[in-house]
Amino acid sequence: MGRGTFDTKLETQTQFYLTAPAPCPYLQGNYERKIFAHLVGPAGRSLNNSLTQLGFRRSQNIVYRPACDGCAACISVRVLVDGFNLTRSFKRVLSRNTDLTLRVRPANATSEQYEIFRRYLYDRHRNGDMAEMTLFDYKQMIENGTTDSHLAEYRLIPKDDSHDTSDGMLLGVALTDQLQDGLSMIYSFYDVCHYQRGLGTYMVLDHVLRTIEMGLPYLYLGYWIKGSQKMDYKSRFTPQEHLIGKNWARVS
């Protein structure tokens, strides 16, 4: 891997590194490289905020973004929640999930979450890099970071008369960062046995609504690649901005 600095106009200079080329998981025949930095020390939170606005993504205590030779297919996307386009399709997804309740909790991994995570990977990403993740690996993904992160758990509301919703069946989980200007969805997964609910879409919609309630402008969704089936869903959430060069531009 290479080593160097990257001009982010932060108050302090941050050391950045460049990975060696590796096969691209999205565009067959291409190779990817990433530039990354470590989130360490008391500046970790502010660094995560600043670099997210520059198109970086967080993974544990590392922030990264693509730096591929001759390719700029990965586009950073954020939803402008003011004036969000709540389509008929989105309304149907919300209606199908009125029996779910949101539980926001600290970013602590549980075996209950991991079982859903493991089934999700086997069903949707069995050939991916994460397919063989152990419970320990999952715990590292959830808990190893220096940012203001939390878990959003989506559970079925119990059908009995109990007012305690914490014991309802867990159907979906989203690891989310709280930023100065919005929320950033780091990773989400759901119980594939309930795929007909549209849980992936529902969790994004819920994060849009939560961002609005917080009075913040953006929901960060990570990278979008035109023509990539894995990422195509992100283009449905409008209006949104794409990071073009060093500037965010509204595209829908």
Image (cartoon, rainbow, N blue to C red):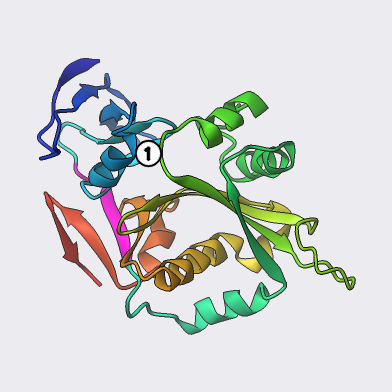
Q: Does the magenta stretch include residue 76?
A: yes
Verify whether residue 102 appears in magenta.
no
Q: Is residue 186 above or below residue 250?
A: above
Q: Residue at x 41, y 68 (%)?
A: 214
* The magenta segment: 72-79
Q: Would you identify the image quadrant in which residue 79 lies?
A: bottom left
Helix, strand or loop: magenta stretch: strand
Q: Where is residue 205 in the image (x, y as percent from the top left)?
A: 49, 68
Q: Give percent across and percent down for residue 154.
A: 65, 59
Q: Which residue is drawn at 59% across and 32% down?
A: 138
Q: Which of 222 and 27 is in front in this view?
A: 222
* Residue density around tag 1, few if under 14, some if 14–19, many if 20 or more, within 10 Å: many
How many labels were placed on the picture? 1
Q: Which of the two residues, 57 or 46, is positioned nearer the viewer here? A: 46
User: Is residue 180 something one can see in this rendering?
Assistant: yes
Looking at the figure, which quarter contains the N terminus? top left
> Which residue: 19% across, 23% down?
15
Front-most of residues 103 and 233: 103
Q: Spot the residue most to the bottom.
A: 88
Residue highlighted by disc 1: 58
Amino acid found under the numbered disc labelled 1: Arg
Residue 7 position within the rendered picture, expressed as x and y whole percent measured from the top left: 9, 35
Q: Is residue 56 visible?
A: no
Question: Residue 68's spot in the image, x, y percent?
Answer: 21, 33
